[in-house]
Amino acid sequence: MNDTTSNESPPDDTAPSEGGLFPIRTVARLTGINPITLRAWERRHNLIRPIRTPSGHRLYSTADIDLIRRIQSLSEQGMGFSQIGIVLKREARLTGRIGPKPPHTDNRALVPESHPLPALSPTQNQATAESLDTAADTPPGLNTLRVQIRQAAIALNTDALVHIEQQALLWYPPEEMIRLFLIDGLHRLERREIWPDQNLVLHWLSDHIHQRIDGLLRQRAQLGQASVAVDIASTDRCYRAAELELVLALAEGFNLHLIPPTLPVLLRSRLVARWGLPHWIRFQLADFPANHDIGVLTTTAIHPCQVTETPHPVEITPRGLCRGSVSDCQAYLSGRFRG
């Protein structure tokens, strides 16, 4: 009678393969980073460069795994991928290591770029995950994600919206994700014909984008740049898409401080004074006085601004209102802040 029992220990899934290299599924288990994100860090951000087998499978060294953990740590600190790349290069120079290798080339046929990479859930079987390792690493369809953004907003579904954002962030930096998907979604919803709860949806999505931009601004603040406060002059409306687009554009050259929309007007004046900010953008839809209901500020220049939806060269009204398109307002205000 044959003995069917075995005293052998189960195989160690985290042990390196021959040559001391690890497949992507093992690296995912060791680091907690899913394979799709690992591919994005490689293909889109050029932060890691695993070895490829003749069949196209990725293999990672222990040094690659240490680098992945370092990227994860920096990302959890709120650092963007472009900044992470700079930090890794600086650390590589200091330690004498070689930074991320340039993309390699081989003789394998290119996979058609039109094939989108599907998202994997933690419960998908390993065979599917392994087959995706050689699939094209291309982002999901731009229009598909944009439609999903609008659907999530109309449903007021925060979980769905965050999930779509996470998908987009695998391929786009945060500022591009906000511009291409969130602000675009708000802009398209603003242009739709009136439907039930339209104002509720617009306020809900606008507030969500406001929070996302505020978080981004906190990460990008740099010394030496002019500091500017931003708010909406009226307390009974939300930020419009064009206004948020202008905020995002100005954030590339200045330290913007978004005033909480729930703060009473008089307290906003005190907050700007406490911050000691030299400039204050106030978005408004009508040409009323710039210092309307904010008290007296002697060291802060107030810039009332009305952003037009269509191309419109900047004009300055008798009351000092800057009225124009996003790009024209950006150019005008940038000149004032640097002047």
Image: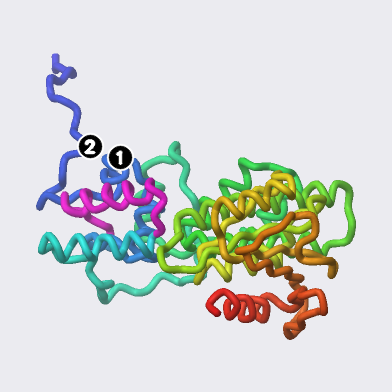
Q: Please rate how many residues cluster around mark 2, counting C-alpha atoms within 10 Å: few if below 14, some from 14 to 19, many from 20.
A: few
Tell me residue 191's x, y (percent): 81, 65
Q: Look at the numbered discs 2 and 1 and tell me whether their residues touch, using CB distance below 8 Å.
A: yes
Tell me residue 301's x, y (percent): 64, 68
Q: Which residue is mark 2?
A: 13
- Colour basis: rainbow
Please tell me how many numbered marks the rendered image carries.
2
Q: Is residue 252 left or right of residue 238?
A: left
Viewport quadrant of the C terminus: bottom right
Q: Residue furthest bottom?
A: 313
Q: Which residue is mark 1?
A: 29
Q: Is residue 310 left or right of residue 61?
A: right
Q: Which residues are magenta?
A: 57-80
- Residue at 26%, 75% in the rendered image: 105
Q: Against 34, is 173 above or below? A: below
- Residue at 77%, 74% in the rendered image: 321
Who is closer to the viewer here, 245 or 56? 245
**Amino acid type, mark 2:** Asp
